[in-house]
Image: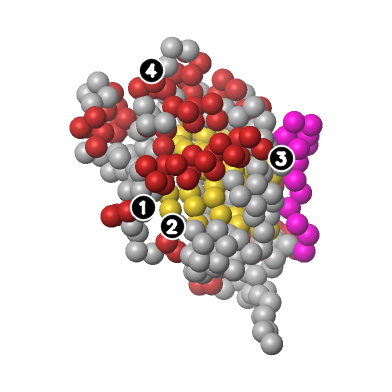
Amino acid sequence: MTITLKPQENTSGDASIADQGFGRVAAVPAVLFDPRRQQQEAIRFFTDNGFVVLSPCLTPSELVALNEFFDRTQKQRPDAWGLGTRRKPHHREQGLIFSQPLLDYPELDGYLQHPASFPIVSALLGGAERVRFSELNLRETPDNAGTGSMNFHHDAVREDRLLRKPYMPCDWLCAIHYLTDVSDQTPAFCVVPKSNQFETLKDAHEGLGNEYVELPIHGPAGSCVLYDTATYHTRLDGDGKKSRRTWHQYYARGGWLRSALPTTDKYQRSPTPALTDWNLFPERLAMHDDPKMRLFFSHWNTAQGEWVASGFDEQVRKSMPRGDQ
Ligand SMILES: [Fe+2]
């Protein structure tokens, strides 16, 4: 007989164990919103909670094509995925990741403003003209990856988030698309709703009181989780045996935006900074014929600036970290 211990809630508020969460797992599953029929409800839910789950988001044919892309590129470019001769010793840490598939695969361009999710992403970043592309990568936790312990954390944040009024639009938004079914047996994304307005997870635990929960997000292949990068989240491991595939896409907010802080009413929010110092946009996107697409790909980091100055030279690209991944 196997005895499974349920996680015990840590009510002490001990900061030393706060990163692993407080063990108060939500009693009810995440609500799934149909992005084609429930746009306004989804936008309102994200605004109130710092995340929303869209399902179904991807179509069955898109799922077939994207899974075929994983199969094909893992064979064609094993090193780019961390397979082959550069196989990562511990899949548990990150799993497999193809960091910059857009560089060599224009076939992915049609997914970058997905018709189901993009209207919602646009509303959450202040309008379609303010949405900027940050990064796209593909990830897989393979079969039998084992279990580990990713801590709760937030991604990139800006200082003013705790003071500005209004809070929205957010600075960065991440979309995690499930390309395989996600359950309590597979790796799963997990969020603390409303935690984006707190500096630490402990502050969220204290400030949210009875509202504080850790919510695993399960859903069928084709679901998409949108989250504010300031929202605390982690990856749960599942049983350590079953695999999961995901497409991660980050968006940033462009343009200057009038806002207010407690000390001044003349505050302007600047465009969100670049998310990394290495991510590159290929020439066909950075120099796109359509000015709207050029604006979408206009948040360049210093590596991109140097690559553009070189005339998108292949050797310059390959000299950069992950330039071939
Ligand atoms: Fe994260």
Q: Residue at x 53, y 29 (%)?
A: 112
**Mark toward the viewer: 1 or 4:** 1
Q: Is residue 66 above or below residue 19?
A: above
Position of residue 2 in the picture relative to residue 66 (left or right): right
Q: Is residue 243 above or below residue 117?
A: below
Q: Mark 4: which secondary structure?
A: loop
Residue of label 3: 56
Label 2–label 3 contact, CB within 8 A: no
Q: Is mark 3 within 8 Å of ligand 1?
A: no
Distance from the alpha carbon under mark 4 to that under mark 2 = 32 Å
Can residue 223 be seen here? The reply is yes
Residue 297 image position (x, y, % from top left): 44, 25
Q: Is residue 303 above or below residue 322?
A: above
Residue of label 4: 287
Position of residue 45 in the picture relative to residue 112 (left or right): right
The crowd level at tag 2 (other Cα within 10 Å; few <14, some 14-19, many 20+) is some
